[in-house]
Amino acid sequence: MELTGRPAVCRIPALWCRRRAAARFFDPNREEKRMPVPKRRTSKARKGKRRSHHALVPVRTVVCKHCGHATLSHTVCGNCGWYRDRQVVAIEEEE
């Protein structure tokens, strides 16, 4: 009598097929891997809680004390070249 493989007489063929399919699915040496799938649908509340930190925030700008142009904080003004009450970059005037 052979101990490996399908037995000679299968009394419950449906059960045998399910076990065989399960063994094929959970075989760690199988080349084809299957992706995990969530068991339950994600609710609207859970989705909203997860996305609560995804909101876009506006860029914070400050007004240049020298020319009044809006610039990013802690950066040189692109309009006049001043930073912290002194001229850092020499800007050529266009004619």
Image (cartoon, rainbow, N blue to C red):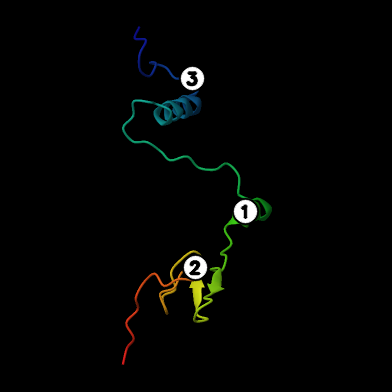
Q: Position of residue 8 (x, y in %)?
A: 38, 16
The residue that mark 2 highlights is 84
Q: Which mark is residue 35?
A: none
Residue type marked 1: Lys
Which mark sits nearer the N-terminus, 1 or 3? Answer: 3
> Which residue is pictured at 56% across the width and 69% down the height?
58
Q: Residues within 10 Å of mark 1 (few under 14, many from 20)?
A: few
Could you give the CA–CA distance between mark 2 and mark 3, rounded to whole angstroms? 88 Å
Q: Is residue 56 left or right of residue 45?
A: left
Residue type marked 3: Arg
Q: Nearer the viewer, residue 57 or 31?
A: 57
Q: Is residue 95 left or right of residue 51?
A: left
Residue sitting farthest toward the bottom: 95
Q: Residues within 10 Å of mark 2 (few under 14, many from 20)?
A: few
The residue that mark 1 highlights is 47
Callout 1: SS? helix
Q: Which mark is residue 11?
A: 3
Q: Is residue 48 above or below residue 23?
A: below
Q: How many marks?
A: 3
Could you give the CA–CA distance between mark 1 and mark 3, rounded to whole angstroms? 48 Å
Q: Is residue 62 above or below residue 93?
A: above
Q: Position of residue 54 (x, y in %)?
A: 57, 58
The picture quadrant where one finds residue 86 is bottom left
Residue type marked 2: Arg
